[in-house]
Image (cartoon, rainbow, N blue to C red):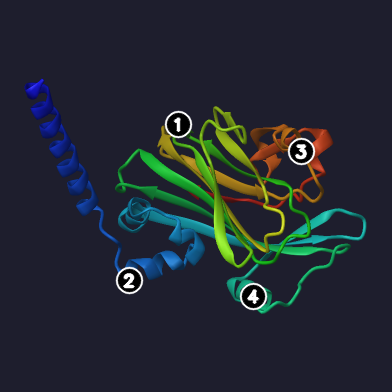
Amino acid sequence: MIVVLKIMKVLTAFIIIVTLCYVNNVKAISDEDYDSLREIFSEARLNIMTEEQKDMLVNGNLTTNTKTYATTQTLNGTYVHTEVDEETAELIKDSFNSGIITYDATHQTTYKRITIIDTSANSSSDVHRVMVYTQWLVTPATTSFDVTAMRIDGGYIIDGTQDGTQTYWKDGSYDYVDYSWNGTNIRKFDNGFGISMNLVNGASYFETDISADVKITSSNAEAFGTYQHAVTNVSLDQSQSYTISHNGLGGVVNFVSSVHNLYDGMTGVSISL
């Protein structure tokens, strides 16, 4: 019995030492690196990132492609998408943050900034961490199951690495919802995946992102990302009635015909891996 207790004490001490070493090896990124990430992510999103995630972004081979779209509902109910420059996008965001409403319930123009991010350990790595990150620049009139998705050409997603996050502002503070690789909100395919996120009722600001590790199998590998906003209330089942296809909305999400018109059909982004 005494021998067992001694072994347990040694094991406990070993575990504590290993844990302390691990914690001590996690270093906060520099202010300069933080500022560089703020050019991509909001402060709210960075605040819920782990130091390991930040470190991977600042020390990896990072490339991005960002587009901001104005999506306008026409009088006949269709949607027109116009890419706007960053100066216009910042003016819209500043107006929104100042409390100026930029849409109405019957003739809505929404502004969304979507970024696809590729991080690899080095320039010759065949495994890339890909993220599709969307920021709303205004509060959407409808909050239902929106879909963020990615499609991979010339590679495949390593199953079990998929995840997602919805960040939002409500009741005077930021909060977030995590989505796992094996949860009920995810749909997985050989060429990509999507996550349905029910925008939190009563929130006034939203960001969503999905991520996964991608193994490239071609020198011409490419990742495509899109964010599809539900323009009316939809169920989770409806939001998941799609396949991943280059013929789909944003070159990614191919909804069944009965669901297709329930989403705004925003254009997507892409990046070479």
Dot 2 amino acid type: Asp
Distance of mark 3 from mark 1, alpha carbons?
25 Å
Q: CA distance from mark 2 to mark 3?
A: 43 Å
Identify the element where label 2 is drawn: helix
Taking the image as shown, residue 79 lies to the left or right of residue 88, namely: right
Packing grade of label 4 (10 A; few <14, some 14-19, many >=20) is few
User: Residue 113, percent across and down?
Assistant: 61, 61
Disc 4 marks a residue whose amino acid type is: Asn
Point out which mark residue 97 bears: 4
User: Element under label 3?
Assistant: loop
**Alpha-carbon neighbours of circle 2 within 10 Å: few (<14), some, or many (≥20)?**
few
Q: Position of residue 91 (x, y in %)?
A: 64, 78
Query: Image point 64% across, 75% down: which residue?
Result: 97
Which of pointers 2 and 1 lies earlier in the amino acid sequence?
2
Question: Viewer-proximal residue, 240 or 269?
Answer: 240
* Residue located beneath label 1 in the image: 160
Residue picked out by circle 3: 235
Mark 1 burial class by Cα count in 10 Å: few <14, some 14-19, many 20+? few
State how far apart marks 2 and 4 are (Cα). Answer: 25 Å
How many other residues sit within 10 Å of disc 3, few (<14), some (14-19) or many (≥20)? few
Please give left or right for residue 117 compared with residue 26 in the image: right
Alpha carbon distance from label 2 to label 1: 32 Å
| Spot occupied by residue 62 in the image (x, y as percentages of width and height) | 38, 55
Between 4 and 185, the residue placed more toward the observer is 4
Q: Which secondary structure lies at badge 1? A: loop
Q: Work out how far the residue at label 1 is from the one at label 4, CA to CA, in angstroms.
A: 37 Å
- Checking the image for residue 31, the label placed there is 2
